[in-house]
Amino acid sequence: MDQFAVRDGELLVGGIPLRRLAARVGSTPFYAYDRTLLSARVAQLRSALPTGIELHYAMKANPMPALVGHMAPLVDGIDVASAGELKIALDAGTDPGCISFAGPGKRDAELRQAVAAGILINVESFRELAVLAEASQALGVPARVAVRVNPDFELKSSGMKMGGGPKPFGVDAEQVPALLQAIGRAELAFEGFHLFAGSQNLKAEAIVEAQQKSFALALRLAEHAPGPVRTLNLGGGLGIPYFPGEQRLDLAPIGAALGDIVAEAATALPGAAIVLELGRYLVGEAGIYVCRITDIKVSRGHTYLVTDGGLHHHLSASGNFGQVLRKNYPVTIGTRMGEPAAEAVSVVGPLCTPLDLIAERMALPQAAEGDLVVVFQSGAYGASASPQAFLGHPGVAEVLV
Ligand SMILES: *Cc1c(COP(=O)(O)O)cnc(C)c1O
């Protein structure tokens, strides 16, 4: 992966050679996130998107507090998926006016916390609305609400579908007019709509199509709204390449199509902000996972690099977080960059399960005990999306460099 530099055969993170960084962290395994790459990604996205598009960070992709603190001033808002994430976003100094909350099973207490905080709540059921109405009465502030719509279409070629057909997320488009009426009756502060069709998409045409259909659906639903639409959130879903043959997403057609949407919204939904809420795309490529080779075993002719890291820290790289057929993440020996591949080896972790696989039959340079294995594309859905307690090994460290 070309986003990290190499010097004297060693990978650099934020300008620091990998071995030096490992010594600074004091233990392996760890995740390292590069601030410069995070900032550059936001800047690159801004230049590809039309002005008038607001960029939000969906922090479930990576909730490390220091990273959220780095992202908060770079983006226009933070999207949280729980009261726990809300705390991190508020602690990072984010203006509550720029925080929104989505998730299919918001607990009563979480909804009350959200009303008290003054953030925008994406309502996903009639029950949530009832709880919000009660909390608004009790606190004397009307809840700020948007309706999360489960659209009547799917995002094509998406790694994970989040909308279309029966889904636990949002309210089916056909039930939204009734929900909008109820919001009006409860005298809550209606602000708009949220639509999110799917995650990890690398096809620009599919993303453009979903955004256009989402916009058209929002225009139809706006006719039933109890007030003007101030925000239209078109969701996330921009993918990053993980596997051989995958290419980085072409932003040009997405930027152009969003330009048309912004222009049309100026007359059809005057004053409405058009929002993209991205997780993986903003942070995924800026992070690596680093573990140390603790043993090298040859079993019936096949070499296993045994490491101190694995599935318990990096479930996605093991292939068990949404993959159907397991494929290798981009993996390298970060202390032997540029050395020729010697043989196809497997990189495994310390867990007593064949699922604990970091790389399967991958051509890597000849490695030794103590060398550092690097998994690229690890900035999103890593530490917080992994079963760290499984088998009782130490947790993983995280650093922002
Ligand atoms: C997970 C999530 C996102 C971010 O998705 P990515 O594919 O990481 O961009 C955005 N919005 C909501 C509501 C989510 O649940």
Image (cartoon, rainbow, N blue to C red):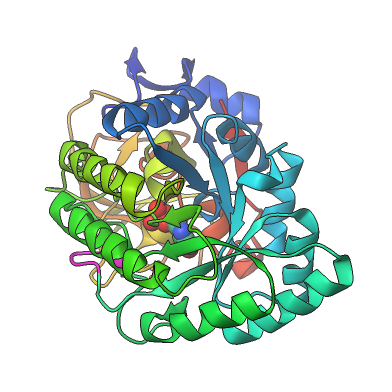
Instruction: Give whichever of 206, 147 is nearer the camera.
Output: 147
Q: Is residue 67 visible?
A: yes
Q: Which residues are magenta?
A: 155-160
Magenta-drawn stretch contains 156: yes
Magenta-drawn stretch contains 237: no
Q: Is residue 348 visible?
A: no
Q: Choose top left, top right, bottom left or bottom right for residue 284.
A: top left
User: Could you say where residue 111 lies in the image, as x and y percent from the top left?
Assistant: 72, 70
Quadrant of the image containing the C terminus:
top right
Q: Residue at x 61, y 25 (%)?
A: 23
The answer to whether residue 87 is above or below residue 355 is: above
Is 208 left or right of 135, judged from the image as shown? left
User: Could you say where residue 78 lies in the image, as x and y percent from the top left?
Assistant: 57, 46
The answer to whether residue 169 is above or below residue 4 is: below
Q: Residue at x 72, y 36 (%)?
A: 93
Quadrant of the image containing the N terminus:
top left
Q: Choose top left, top right, bottom left or bottom right for residue 335.
A: top left
The answer to whether residue 211 is above or below residue 307 is: below
The answer to whether residue 96 is above or below residue 93 is: below
Q: Residue at x 59, y 55 (%)?
A: 100
Q: Residue furthest top?
A: 8
Q: How many numbered marks are there?
A: 0
Quadrant for ligand 1 reads: bottom left
Instruction: Give whichever of 262, 30 is nearer the camera.
Output: 262
User: Could you say where residue 67 lies in the image, as x and y percent from the top left?
Assistant: 59, 37
Chief secondary structure of the magenta portion: loop
User: Could you say where residue 277 lies in the image, as x and y percent from the top left?
Assistant: 44, 50
